[in-house]
Image (cartoon, rainbow, N blue to C red):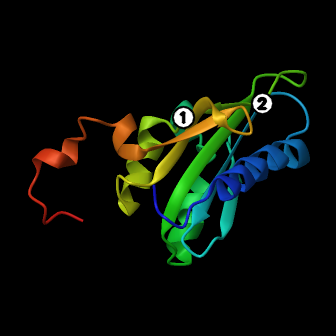
Amino acid sequence: MHSSITDKGLSQLLQAATDLVARRLPTGEAVAAAILTQSHQIYTGIWIDAALDAAALCAETGPICEAHRTNEVVLASVCVMRESTNGDIQVVPACGICQERLSYWGMDLVVGIPGTKIDGVCDFLPLSALRPHYWRDVLPKKLP
């Protein structure tokens, strides 16, 4: 884990995603994400559903685009979901596509997974732990 990331910072990241669910998606199914950058910025986003599944956007998409737009380095990401209005908010790992998008910043970036270390609901693991047989590892190092 990057030395500038603290448990307090990860807790704030988790809180930002959870707060977004409460504020922007107070009822029904909800998915929100937050990313933490090297300059300690937190960008958040929500899942956008679509009638055609391929047109839906993961909650991480907006924050990832914002980090690219502002030329920020992403250090950590967390995604939370609630299945119904009265359901508990739970941490879910980034999907494979979002893991691929996050890998732009390297495999040491940490991603939230269900656990207990942070606020009793979340652990963070390096992206490399979620993708132990990453396809780019067998390619020449010249690729971006």
Answer above or below: position of 67 versus 110.
below
In the image, residue 21 lies at what x, y percent? 82, 42
Quarter occupied by residue 69:
bottom right
Mark 2: give few (<14), some (14-19) or many (20+) Cα within 10 Å.
some
Q: Nearer the viewer, residue 54 or 90?
A: 90
Residue under numbered circle 2: 89
Q: Nearer the viewer, residue 23 or 47?
A: 23
Badge 2 marks a residue whose secondary structure is: loop
Kindly identify the amino acid type of the residue bearing the numbered disc 2: Ile
Residue at 59% across, 43% down: 58
Numbered label attached to residue 8:
none
In contact (CB < 8 Å): disc 1 and disc 2: no
Q: How many marks?
A: 2
Residue at 58% across, 37% down: 123
Residue under numbered circle 1: 93
Does residue 68 show up? yes
The CA distance from mark 1 to mark 2 is 13 Å
In the image, residue 121 lies at what x, y percent? 70, 32
Locate the N terminus by quadrant.
Answer: bottom left
Residue at 71% across, 50% down: 11
Locate the C terminus by quadrant.
Answer: bottom left
* Left or right: 144 in relation to 17: left
In the image, residue 28 lies at what x, y percent? 85, 28
